[in-house]
Image: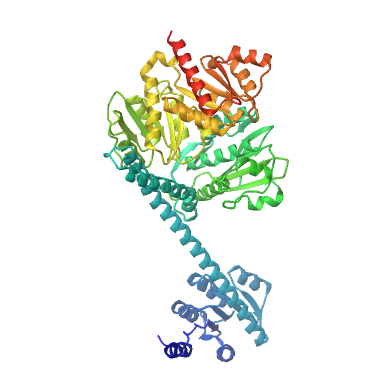
Amino acid sequence: MTDAESDKDRISTENAPKPAVARPKIMVVDDELGFRELASRVFQDDYDVVTAANGEEAVQKAGAKDIDVVVSDMTMPKMGGLDMLSALKEIDPKVEVILVTGFATLETAVESMKRGAYDYITKPFDIEELFRLVARALDKRRLNQQVDELKEINRFKSEFLANMSHELRTPMNAILGYTSLHLDRLYGEITQKQEDALKRVEAAGKNLLHLINSILDLSKLSAGRMPLYLEEFRLRDLIEEVISMMECLAKAKQLKLEVSVPKDMRVRSDKTKLKQILINLVNNGIKFTSSGGVFIEVDQSQKQPRFNIRVRDTGIGIKTKDLTSLFQEFKQLDSSPTREYGGTGLGLVISRKFAQLMGGDIGVTSAAGSGSTFTVTLPLESDRQAQSVENVFQPSVAGSRGKVFLAIDDDPEVLMLLRDSLQGTGYKFAGALNAEEGIAMARELKPFAITLDIMMPHKDGWSALQIMKNDPELRTIPVIILSIMDNKTLGYALGVTDYILKPFERGELLKKLRALDRCAQEGDVLKRTPCTALVVDDEKIIADHLKEALSSEGYVVDSVNNGSDALTRINASPPDILFLGLMLPGINGFEIIEAMEKDPKFKDTAIFILTARHLTPQETDYLQKRTAAVIQKGSRSLPEILGQVKKRLKALEASDER
């Protein structure tokens, strides 16, 4: 294009007519023709003006035209100003109405404001004053429209995130799962280049899925896409479930955990979501409290059919200036305790949105240093729209016996992926889409292992786990949590054998299942041959390498990095072998040994001490009498430490066999 052509196009564009901007529409309503004509002349230069002689005509014209502001007399034949105001608000709630009258009273002024009038003026008035009043009314209408547009944009954004998060997570789980199956050569041999490419796909997919999972629940709530599963239940039973789950965490910090709730109060709500709210609030209370306790109190409102659940703690409290930001998404308070305790900043946000979804809310009162009280207020009987999920997955095992593996998950895609993961392993697969079905199948099939999801409708994974651990027929079956929810501390406290975060790796799952299967086949030998191990050490490199080495030997291994979590874990499920550091944060290794020595359930647990500390003769004597081995870390390389551990383990197994 030449410069002349460019200049010609520019000039042509500059001279092009600008698109017309729609002018605001004003309606003047009065039974006096003179006032209608006067107002029309005043407004016609700036606005499109429509006139009407009475309220009925005004309502009729407003239904056919998009009116922004109405200036109307109060007293007119057929339909007066107040009745016209109510009718116009039904047509367009955002229309602004200015009422004019020559017979002003306080009662009519108050009534006009109640019905939604923008303003109320009396005759005679200055026409310039009316002009300014109309301009301000138009500004208000524009602001209201902008707010509505922003709300709509935010709703579209949330709907988009909810749709995309859900639509992406399901295929991403499948992509990662089937990528893992290809890497395990389940569908045939692959070349080295193919393996390298698949590993890159797997790594990138995991990163993407982590991002998707982090926004899924929040975006579904914001977009109004989170389903409700309403059922009637006794509130005391639900709260006692929460107490029994969280009691071990409270005991580990020597905190009280008390509840006061009417015995026979029944509510109709989403049991799983209410339970998750209480778990979040009680867990936060325990986390931020070092002495005293957490107290749950329930009462019923006397004036309306609602109830309140107050979760009060005696912890560090919250500064008054921080209360307003407590429920903001991804917002974490700036105080050092918050940074110490960590978190994503979404727990309270999601809890509050759950409560609002059920027709209630969560409030908080607190002050720094004096604890906090969170109050959940909900209707006794929710009238929100409930949704149900159709059971579309049919288990592939019915009445089988032998090496049956049972998976309980409300996502059919996960069940099908688990089923494919077991191809060629010799295990028979059974799947259940809800907790009730899963528990029934466990009683019928007696599987050698169970994987269990947490977030399921009607009865969540925590409830199912407690039922199974309290059932003499099921309590000995190893349960592995398989969930996107990372709450390992609570899981181990409730007696799970292992905890795997989604998306799972086929190799990791099979390694754990084979170790559990080996333990199950050994029967009585199980008591003598170590199968489960817990590594307690604040040196991550030591813990990780030891965990990897033991896993390759067939052990089911977990690790924690502090004494408090170690006590919680071993109290819930004593390991066969405990690898214990001495200088741990909080509770040290000597205190853990002392606590175990007092409890007979730890008599079969072999303790291996891992320490870089220079021990006194008295400490050495104390440990040699109470542990299977003391391994010094400071003077040895990592391979030497691992070699010594394996040597001691073999000696221990040989001793047990004799």
> Residue at coordinates 53% horizontally, 27% vertically from top-left?
535
Going by the image, does 107 lie left or right of 558?
right
Going by the image, does 113 lie left or right of 208?
right
Would residue 598 be seen by someone viewing this image from the given angle?
Answer: no
> Residue at coordinates 33% horizontally, 35% vertically from top-left?
431
In the rendered view, tell whether residue 63 sits above or below residue 510. below
Residue 162 falls in image quadrant: bottom left
Name the residue at the top extreme.
658
Pinpoint residue 57: horizontal percent, then vertical percent.
48, 81
Q: Quadrant of the N terminus?
A: bottom left
Name the residue at the right extreme.
369
Pinpoint residue 10: horizontal percent, then vertical percent.
46, 87
Residue 517 falls in image quadrant: top left
Q: Nearer the viewer, residue 183 or 350?
A: 183
Would residue 527 be seen by someone viewing this image from the given angle?
Answer: yes
Pinpoint residue 646: horizontal percent, then vertical percent.
48, 21
Pinpoint residue 547: horizontal percent, then vertical percent.
49, 29
Q: Quadrant of the C terminus?
A: top left
Q: How is the image coloured?
A: rainbow
> Residue at coordinates 30% horizontally, 23% vertically from top-left?
402
In the rendered view, tell whether residue 240 sits above or below residue 61. above
